[in-house]
Amino acid sequence: MRPDIISDALNEVMNARKAGKENLMTNKSSKLLLKVLEIMKQYGYIDYELQENGKLKIILKEIRECKAIKPRYTVNKEQIEKYMRRFLPARNFGYVIISTNKGLMTHTEAQENKIGGSLIAYFY
């Protein structure tokens, strides 16, 4: 059984937030995790930098909750709304990250492009 790096890293972020920390260091890293963190950084929820020793420094900003979605549901463009209601607390509040054939994107970008994909994580 392989470890889920995204789930582990997002759990570390939530544990650090609950402990009142402003940043954390983790040795978990993958291309997919970096793209998820880049989306979160783009919307101002966190900041991150990859250290020379391979560790990842994550700086917490406005994040309230972030979790990986397991199992990774496959959705089409019509089903995205259903999963937004399931994982996000309110309309226009937070984002669901979807892996599509055009790369990782938020649910709003996927709806604009009228494509579906596999649900990866959510944050708000």
Image (spheres, rainbow, N blue to C red):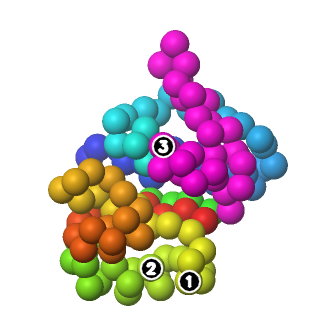
Q: Are marks 2 and 1 in contact (CB under 8 Å)?
A: yes
Residue at the far right in the pictured view: 20
Q: Looking at the picture, which amino acid does disc 3 mark?
A: Glu
Instruction: Tell me the residue that label 1 is attached to.
Output: 91
Q: Amino acid at mark 1?
A: Arg
Numbered disc 1: secondary structure: loop
Q: What residue did someone put label 3 on?
A: 38
Which is more foreground, mark 2 or mark 1? 1
| Numbered range of the magenta stretch | 37-64
Residue 4: image x %, image y %? 37, 48
In the rendered image, the vertical position of residue 95 relative to residue 26, given as above or below: below
Q: Distance from label 2 to label 1 (Cα)?
A: 8 Å
Q: Residues within 10 Å of mark 1 (few under 14, many from 20)?
A: few
* Residue 115, horizontal then vertical, whole percent: 22, 70
Who comes first in sequence, dot 3 or dot 2? 3
Where the C terminus falls, by quadrant?
A: bottom right
Relative side of 83 to 11, left or right: left
Work out how far the residue at label 1 is from the one at label 3, CA to CA, in angstroms.
23 Å
Which residue is label 2 attached to? 84
Dots 1, 3 in contact, CB < 8 A: no
